[in-house]
Image: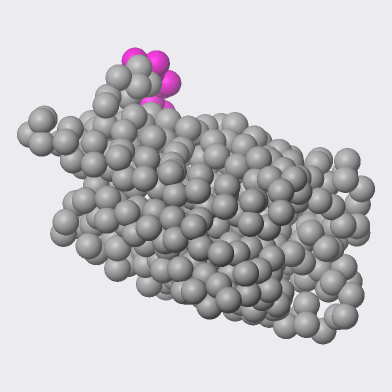
Amino acid sequence: MNKELKTVDTISSFTRWAVVAIISCGAYVVYLTYLARYSFYDQVIDGLKISNSQLGVLYGLYGTTATIAYFPGGVLADKVRVKYLATLGFAMSAVLTFWYSLAPSYGQLKVIFLLFGLCTTFIFWGIRYKAIRLVSTEENYSTNIGISYGIVGVVGLVISFISIAIFEMFDDPTAGFHTVLMFFAIINAVFAVLSFLFIPKFADEFETERKKFNLDEVVQALKHPGVWLTTLCMFFVYTVYTSLAYTVSFLTAIGATAAIASIVGTIRTYGTSLFSSPIVGGIAEKKTPSKTIVVCTAITAGCLIVMTAAPKGAGFIIPSVVLIIVLSFFLNGAYGVTSSMLTETNVPVAIFGSASGILSVIGFIPDMFVSPIVGSWLDTYDTAGAYTRIFAVLAVSALLALVCAYAVRVYKKKTT
């Protein structure tokens, strides 16, 4: 065997944890520019000097590229080494973020967001779990994945709070935004170098006898009720999940400062996930994923219904913060365990890959249309009118996710 090729048994402890750290940090770092609006919505709008509708179009373009790239991204991960894909993903993200920081035209921004879909989903997404698997045994893979998610949450919190501090250094929001983007570009460039230096080539990255594509497996997956119930549940859960970026702009719209809204957005995005994923995941393991999702989406819908009906004014800032944190906790938990319903509905191992592909492509379609629609509402209606519509639609989506999860429970009882 080539001495340069490593296995889980021959890599050093340092190399193992270097790979886990780089890939786990990368699961946040490579998405830094895309995720900016989740904590800094108003700063993004002010920094780019564009409308809500235009920002929605940009994220819709990203969502289109990303959705199309899920399937080929998985194939690419089975053809090219993790070392090179990680390096390329970070390097491409660094270049695009640097370009983004130079105040490009709106036409150039469209190109940048289309390309972001390639460096994240097409290049990096496929190696996210594969790299962790390559440095793990069957026994400690779950532990390493749990550690990986913890690293993502911690890195997200640290970088977000550093970004908030950078914004506070500038009176001009545009200058602050572009400085933050330069900070993001540098981080991605550093991780590109770290990936090339510390991620080894693995002996078992590629199968010696690759299984050929089998259309029958896709057809079987499409015919399985569990695949469709789980996919539809993911579609509705993700519709709410990807829309939570607008809770940041909602807080500023009703009177909160941009700094407070950013802190709440950071805690909502990264702080709650640090606790919700392991807690809700543990409950799902004991009570079944579908039952857990029914409870989580019911609480999420309840919070959104209150936000829909409540007056949109300064007196609602503190209740809004509480509701946003609560619904984020339960929604993050539901999002984390939704795919587990594929196992709960006894989707056969032989078609599990095809089922996961269907889940990814259809479940994440909301990235293509949510941002353009919501952006248009924010520019068309006043604060009360826009956010009443947004929260009402999200409440309905949460209830539809609940219905899908309950249908899984009914299906499971009928088939067991």
Percent of width and height locating residue 393: 51, 44
Is 279 positioned to the left or the right of 160 in the image? left
Percent of width and height locating residue 293: 29, 52
Is residue 55 visible in this depiction of the protein? no
Q: Quadrant of the C terminus?
A: top left
Residue 117 inside the magenta-drawn segment: no
The residue positioned 92% from the left and 48% from the top of the image is: 105
Specify the principal SS of the magenta part.
loop
Nearer to the camera, 3 or 59: 59
The residue positioned 16% from the left and 59% from the top of the image is: 286
Percent of width and height locating residue 322: 46, 74
Quadrant hosting residue 67: top right
Q: Residue furthest left?
A: 416
Quadrant hosting residue 8: bottom left
Residue 215 inside the magenta-drawn segment: yes
Q: Is residue 227 above or below residue 102?
A: above
Nearer to the camera, 391 or 68: 391
Q: Which residues are magenta?
A: 208-216
The residue positioned 69% from the left and 41% from the top of the image is: 372
Percent of width and height locating residue 6: 46, 56
Nearer to the camera, 48 or 399: 399
The residue positioned 38% from the left and 29% from the top of the image is: 354
Nearer to the camera, 403 or 242: 403
Is 13 positioned to the left or the right of 188 in the image? left
Judging from the image, the colouring scheme is one colour
Is residue 313 visible in this depiction of the protein? yes
